[in-house]
Amino acid sequence: MLMIACTDKNAYYERPSWLEPSVYEVLQKEARFTNYLKCVDRTLYASALKGNGLYTVFAPNDEAFAKYLASKGVSSVDNLSDTLVNKIVS
């Protein structure tokens, strides 16, 4: 006896509509965490924060970043070292 079933496997693995957005999406929507998200994108944490999961993130907003960058004499998060960016995000 042979049984075959055809199902749409892509639909099975799609994100459910009732699931809350990812941490990354929430921070993007706030529109005051752009520097933090630039840092996240430079780390391995990006895939985790863009995906599903329960995470608590204490993210500095752009105003905090402006003060921090000024204290370091740096004009942009792009000028921060990868090591420092990883420390900020983690």
Image (spheres, helix red, strand yellow):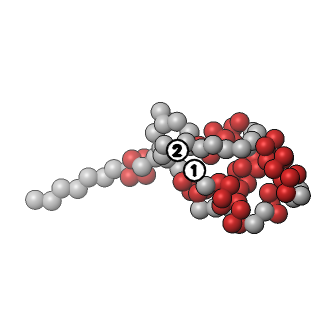
Mark closer to the observer (1, 2): 2
- Towards the viewer: 27 or 17: 27
For mark 2, what is the residue?
55
- Towards the viewer: 4 or 37: 37
Residue occupying image coordinates x 74% and y 41%: 61
Query: Does residue 67 appear to the left or right of 12 in the view shown?
Result: right
Residue 83, how many percent across, how many down? 69, 66
**Kind of residue at disc 2:** Tyr
Residue 36, how many percent across, how many down? 72, 49
Q: Residue furthest left?
A: 1
CB within 8 Å, label 1 to label 2? yes
Q: Is residue 41 visible?
A: no
**Kind of residue at disc 1:** Leu
Tag shown at residue 49: 1
Tag shown at residue 60: none
Q: Is residue 67 visible?
A: yes
Residue 4, how many percent across, how many down? 23, 56
Residue occupying image coordinates x 26% and y 52%: 5
Residue occupying image coordinates x 47% and y 33%: 18
Query: Does residue 89 appear to the left or right of 71 in the view shown?
Result: left
- Towards the viewer: 55 or 28: 55
Circle 2 — which element?
loop
Label 2: how many residues lie within 10 Å, few (<14), some (14-19) or many (20+)? few
Residue occupying image coordinates x 31% and y 52%: 6
Q: CA distance from mark 1 to mark 2?
A: 8 Å
